[in-house]
Image: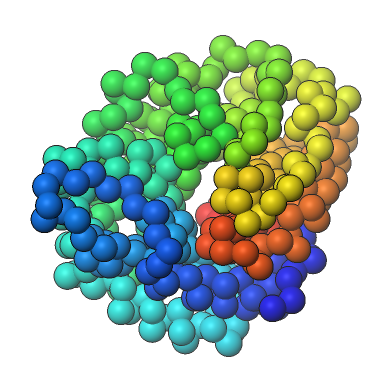
Amino acid sequence: MSLPSASRLTPQVASKFARIALGHVTREFPNKLDHVLEGPADARGPRALHPIFFGSFDWHSCVHGYWLLAALLRREPGIPEASAIGDLFDDAFTDAKVAGEVAYLARAASRGFERPYGWGWLLKLQAELLSHRDRPWAGKLQPLATAFAERFFDFLPKANYPVRTGVHSSTAFAIALAQDYAAAVGDAALTRLFLEKARAWYLSDRDAQAWEPSGDEFLSATLMEAECLRRILPAEEFASWLKDFLPRAAQRQPASLFAPAVVSDRSDGKIAHLDGLNFSRAWCWRELAATLAPDDPLASLAEATAQEHLEASLPHVAGDYMGEHWLASFALLAMTAGETIG
């Protein structure tokens, strides 16, 4: 499969990404489970544990593989893969299968399951499905979305400190994604909770040093914090905060935020994360650029930096399964940055 070079979504790129995702969301093995065994009866395979999200190497990648397909179907409904996506969703999003996913969460041993990365992605998937108003999919998945929203309400009041990482534990990333759901369903209480925690965790941060990347990061801890606050703070408050948080960004400082990561071995699942870092930085830079005045010198620099990061990793969305099972989702975030849901 030839790989995309455009930095914005086209029907041709959408079709290629759809074929990639259709090839892995129902591929059960290899699989890396996030699963606590309470006894011998819990020693079961991915499909038995997760009736919907059993593919794509791990649960959360399967969730955002479905998000990718739903987002592509909305944006490019004429792609040849559209009917296959619809058939897949009709088969996946049923009362019985959703009940199976909800039942897994109800296990005492599942209290910390996929916290917080998978929580954010499941709610972002539901936000996307809600936009397919002529389909029953969001209605079917709502019990699972409600269960994950309740997890945020239970966990965040106890979370005195943020998790400032560039991997799955990032609290900024999870809140940024989950806010799409809160906005889509008009959940003012969830938005208020996110705003309160983000202010408590991040609002006093100044002059970010950006000690990144580490060797297996797929998120910029620095830019992800900024993107999280961009989504939930009032615009004027965010603009003031951003100037203090990245006071020399227009001078390309910290320099680490402007240089794409180099990926030395794409067959190594952890090192391959760095392609995701390039995509997530491109996503954040583009989203941040959209908030700046056209004459702000950082605006053009942010867009140029996003383009450079995209070009570094777009040729590698497919080719090795360690990246192929998830990278297209992050590429799509970058390629569609600036949309309300995407």
Q: In this view, does 37 lie above or below 4?
A: above
- Residue found at x 74% / y 76%: 2
Quadrant position of the N terminus in the picture: bottom right
Along the viewing direction, whichever of 262 and 228 lies nearer the viewer: 262
Residue in view at x 35 percent, y 38 percent: 115
Colouring style:
rainbow
Please name whichever residue, 258 or 74, is drawn nearer the observer in this view of the structure: 258
Q: Where in the figure is residue 90, as x and y percent of width and height?
A: 32, 79
Residue 164, compared with residue 48, is above or below; it is above
Identity of the residue drawn at 66% across and 62% down: 317
**Quadrant assignment, res 226:** top right
Q: Can residue 230 be seen by looking at this rendering?
A: no
Q: Position of residue 244 (x, y in %)?
A: 70, 16
Q: Nearer the viewer, residue 122 or 299?
A: 122
Q: Quadrant of the C terminus?
A: bottom right
Question: Residue at the location (40% across, 67% down)?
Answer: 29
The number of discs equals: 0
Classify residue 188 by image quadrant: top left
Q: In this view, does 338 lie to the left or right of 254?
A: left
The spot of residue 339 in percent (x, y) is: 61, 54
Evaluate whether residue 7 shows in this view. Answer: yes
Q: Is residue 268 left or right of residue 134?
A: right
Q: Quadrant of residue 225?
A: top right
Q: Nearer the viewer, residue 135 or 39?
A: 39
Image coordinates for residue 129, horizontal then vertical, percent: 40, 64
- Relative placement, left or right, of 131 versus 265 is left
